[in-house]
Amino acid sequence: MGILIDNNTRVVVQGATGKEGAKSTQNMINYQTQVSCGVTPGKGGTEINGLKIFDSVKEALEFDNLINTSVIYVPPLLVLDATMEAIKAGIKMVFIVTENVPIKDSAKIYNFAQEKGTIVIGPSSIGAINVGVCKIGSIGGSKNEAFTSGRVGIISKSGGMCSETALILSNIGIGQSTVVGIGGEVIAGFTFTDGLKLFQEDEETDLVVIFGEIGGRYEELAAEMIKRGEFTKPVVAYISGSFAETLPRNRSLGHVGAIIESGNDSASYKKDALRKSGVLVADFHDEIPNLVKQALEKLK
Amino acid sequence: MKLVEHRGKELLETAGIRIPPGIVTNNNSYINLSYHKAKYREFFLDHQGVIIKAQIPYGYRAKHGLIKASENYTDSLKIIDEMYNKEFMGQPISTLLIEKKLNVKSEYYVSITYDTKSRNPMILFSRDGGIDIEDVLKNKEPVKYIVSIIDGLSDFETREIVKQAGFVGKDIFLLSNFIKNAYDCFIRYDCKALEINPIIETHSGQLYAGDAKITIDDNAVQRHDIFYDITEIEDRSLLTERELEARKIDLHDHRGVAGKTFIDMDGDIAILASGGGASLTCMDALLVADGKPANYTEYSGNPPRSKVRRLTEITLSNPNLNGCLIIGGTANFTDVYETLGGFVEGLLDLPHLPKYPIVVRRAGPRSKEAFEMLREFAEQHKLNIELYGEETPMTQAVKRMIEKVEEYKNGNSN
């Protein structure tokens, strides 16, 4: 079980011949992920790491019609085209690892995917790992020791903090079911509420950790969903970016793509909303393990 | 990237929106040269009244005395002189837009941004525009309209928006056309936000953009030749020298991110953080533990060595430092050896190597090799450096940095 990916996941890598694409492809294969082939327009007929490369997603599907997932590593301004290609070819799940995708393109991607019933995770998603089963994207890099198998799900805007959050849990013996990086963009394809919906149905997940950031409204929407009783498992949350409240307003922070505009996207506002919905909120990142431990003990 | 008013208006004009006749002067001497003075005099006499506006990408200009009207030529010269002598947030005013003073009948308001819930563009429109718009909108909700980015904006939709705001008859067409053009501009130039306040209706029944506040999506700048030299357009007046230099690092090089978000702060601990989430987490921890950051910045997405080198040089050029914190979570694919290699090269670019303590907390691909390299370099150059890996939580490394800075400051004062 776990969410989004499992041992039926079969992957095409769009942008497999680029530096990051090639490296991550190898890392996915090393983690037993079924990577079928790659796509780079203009490089069809070549091979990389023993993997066949095609010019188009359509050709990749003709080669292997069991492919059900794409992971995208193309440069930022080519992401819209690559994603549309995957969706139109009929692929039902797309991870976009590329960062710095224009907001207009992200909006088009999200709305088009909605129409076609495709799940798009990202842009700026580090990928996802179903611990001990397979992984997709760049999560974990070449080392996966931070992740240990268990029953805690993690949804994180930050890619770097996926491993870090898993690590501090693993260090006290708490393992993870699926860890997914959703990216910190203002327009995201897959948000906390989408992740919670899937974790609610997942029998192998007892608790979910949310790593949020300032900017946007997705944490607030998660709080509302929990309050409505649509997610019933315990949630532990950490929201980074409190320091931004000490800065002059209207300054963009990090690739989180966040602009503090109205005040209701600040870290303190989000923490407050989550607390009011019964979420256990960590003020420091290293408080997460203790809160998770306490909540898990209560479940027993 | 925020555009100043006259740049924003140039874009609006290409999308078919009428802007008031105007001239841009970009330094004080310009208007005093006899040739330009004659030109300006001609402009003034043609229009019988001007509005003089300081070009800074910031709201509330009128409230700060940075927008002034004049209907007397001699007075207007005095206002221009005074405006150039003003400062804004410690920066001199370098550019003025001098426009024809329009014959205003009514003022309206329109803005377009992205709605993060529907993940589509959202238009706000109100028939009460003008300088007190924030107060007005508090009491009276503007018309909110979500546009399907896939379908685009049709004429019947803009007519609907205008009708909802209370317009009837022929006025509907005039305004709906204006909104359509504003939306076209928003989409065409990859805007993140576009605001026209006020939309001016003159007594002769024509509509003008009275102001333009436009933010272009930094990630789309490369798509548009007109933004090629971004630093020419960027809100220079609000950036420090280091902030401006740091923003140049990512220009025209999409491999990873470095320095795009550099912010100078008042403290004495230089920050070179890796990863958006990790950097925020570390700043939060630093402030709670009473550390004083000298800056905020982060690099991520496996930037090449050269970018980190330049970012290091810029960050450590601050003369007020008592410590340097290099911090990141457990990197997934950023090559720690390459990026810390860039840090070392950046150190060597400095006029002299820092004597203050450096704390490194880093984990991820090739961090072992990176630490060996750093240890050797530190020994050779007698650097005061401590290295921590994934066994040490980030928050603890932050606390260690603060202790080291205290030690260093006490040692200096003894």
Image (cartoon, coloured by chain):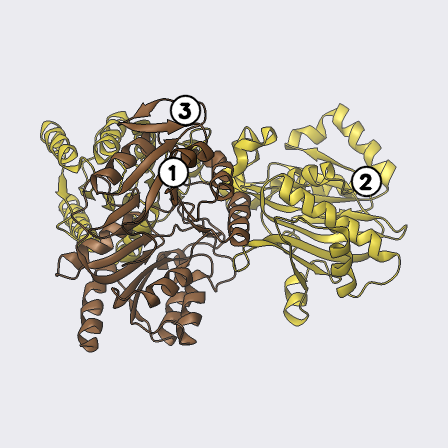
Select label 2 or label 3 by which is in front. 3
Please provide percent x and percent y for residue A165.
Answer: 24, 55
Whole-number angstrom distance, CA of label 2 to CA of label 1: 46 Å
Q: SS at mark 3?
A: loop
Pointer 2: what residue?
A: B73
Q: What residue is disc 3 on?
A: A44
Give the camera-side residue of A91 and A280: A91
Q: Is residue B313 visible?
A: no
Badge 2 marks a residue whose secondary structure is: helix
Q: Residue at x 32, y 24 (%)?
A: A47
Q: Nearer the viewer, mark 2 or mark 1?
A: 1
Asked whether the beta carbons under mark 2 and mark 1 sit within 8 Å of each other, the answer is no
* Chain under disc 3: A
Identify the amino acid type marked 2.
Tyr
State the mark number for residue B259: 1
- Foreground mark, 1 or 3, reads 3
Please tell me the colour of chain A.
Answer: brown
Left or right of B370? Residue A62 is right
Disc on the earlier residue, 2 or 1: 2
Specify the subunit that label 2 lies on: B
Can you say whether A127 is above or below A210 in the image?
A: above
Type of amino acid at the residue the image marks with label 3: Gly
Give the image location of residue A89, x and y in percent.
49, 41
Q: Amino acid at mark 1?
A: Gly
What is the crowding at mark 3: few (fewer than 14 residues within 10 Å), some, or many (at least 20)?
A: some
Chain given the colour yellow: B
